[in-house]
Amino acid sequence: MNRKKREFCTYLNFDYRGVEEHLAKMAARGWRLEKVGPWFWTYRRAEPAQAAYAVTYLPSASQYDPEPSETRESLEELCAAAGWEPVAEWAQMQIFVNERPDPLPLETDESVRLAAIHRSMKKGFLRWGAVMLVLALVMAGLQVKTLLTDPFHLLSSSSGLFSAALWDLLVILQTANLLGYWRWYRKSAQSVAQGGPCAAAGRGLRLLNLIALWLVGICLVLYLAATAATAESDQSVFMVCYLALFGLMVFLLDRIRRALRRQGVSRRKNLAITLVMDVVLSVVLVGGLFTAYGILRFSGVLDGDGTYIYEHREWDTSPEPLPLTLEDLTGEAYPHVRRNRYGSGSFLVREDHCWETVLDAADDGMSLDYTITTLALPSLRDLAAESILTEWTDRGYYDWVEADPAPWGADAAYRQIFDDGWDRFLTGDYLLCWPDRIVEISLTDLEPTPGQMAVIGEKLQNA
């Protein structure tokens, strides 16, 4: 039997009634609150009992205060006389339990309770909620700008879609939480002014926070699935490691903060040390992950069967297969080949980037570079083609001209042209369009014949 369990907390800081009722129900089921964490509350197994919980607030308290705090000690001494024992604290919220039958209430003056809650919320919940809302609005605004100016760039990026979903969720959640508090505070102030108690926070905001949690989890699963489907396996592993290290960093920072509190370190020193450790852990954990991945990538460890050096250049021992190779176009088998292939994109747009360079018997080099963009919806083709056709024209020197699509077996074809006012010539870059696929191919070392165009179109259309 599990002796401990963790529960994601969806209660807001001011929802003291909800917290009290929930903890009492947990105690009746044999679970006692043991610790309040940044995301999860920890319970320990105990005998089921009828226990009363009470929540009070210390506006001057901070999660960085040394333990024991003089203010909190004074509060605990006053509460102990009535049988209330401290259980845990959550920022300014102080949680007590009492197992006596019909215990005396911990709070008797509702106006004092409301004033303490409001001061506590202004110190933490409202301040940081407003900061996060402003940040989320800025980031969501940038996503909207990208969607309006370059929608294909956003739709073709799993990370872009994931971050856009998270920022939009954060805007909705923070707006609802802040408005929900002000609504609760206004109703409570009216009730207290008439001699009544503070208003109940209700289940709406808790349900919204729970839904937001599930949506974040769904978005994360979709993001990881899209990364695994569109990128190389090592990139998928990298993203899982990155998210795991981020969670580890949050866990370690919380442990460091708690350890400093137990050592009696002052609030300012605790905050300063925690911030410094935040930077250090970011550099060591996340920065170390990027460094290790880069070393493995550029050293060739992740490339499979290894490489060798010839003519001061690196070549593949066993080149990986590509949908289209220079051997397919020329019919010549090359003794020295170097290839690379990596994927990117989203569930809507998948991009496969392929590159090959060869060295023939006469030590003459040739290269082939192409990107296959596969579209989940044919309606995205015009959007994708427009984005690609305008990508390089912003510099003013490059443009695209229509080409005959028939030799390629394509629906539409374009060729890039260079014009700087003095020189004007066609480059070796082509754009080929099919209903659900677009191919960008660079043939700088080869002027394709109609037969080679047909081979390119056949292989890349069906790759």
Image (tube, rainbow, N blue to C red):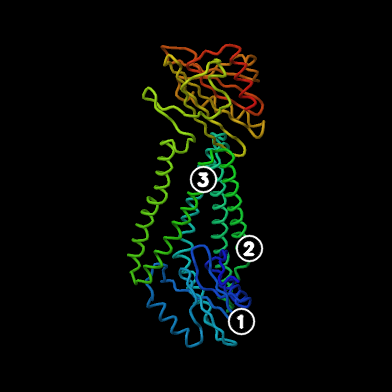
Q: Which residue is mark 1?
A: 49
Quadrant of image for the C terminus: top right
Going 43% across and 15% down the picture, which residue do you hit? 364
Q: Nearer the viewer, residue 343 or 144?
A: 343
Going 39% across and 64% down the picture, which residue do you hit? 256
Q: Earlier in the sequence, mark 1 or mark 3?
A: 1
Q: Earlier in the sequence, mark 1 or mark 2?
A: 1
The dot on residue 237 is 3
Going 58% across and 81% down the picture, which residue do you hit? 51
Could you give the CA–CA distance between mark 1 and mark 3, rounded to whole angstroms? 46 Å
Q: Residues within 10 Å of mark 2 (few under 14, many from 20)?
A: few
Label 1 amino acid? Ala
Q: Which residue is mark 2?
A: 204
Find numbered disc 2 in the image and state the secondary structure of the residue it sits on: helix
Q: Are marks 1 and 3 in contact (CB under 8 Å)?
A: no
> Nearer the viewer's eye, disc 1 or disc 3?
3
> Nearer the viewer's eye, disc 1 or disc 2?
1
Is residue 332 placed above or below 383 in the rendered structure? above
Label 2 amino acid? Gly
The location of residue 385, given as percent across then percent down, is 59, 26
Going 51% across and 83% down the picture, which residue do you hit? 84
Q: Nearer the viewer, residue 309 or 374?
A: 309
> Nearer the viewer's eye, disc 3 or disc 2?
3
The dot on residue 442 is none
Q: Residues within 10 Å of mark 3 (few under 14, many from 20)?
A: few
Q: Nearer the viewer, residue 343 or 384?
A: 343
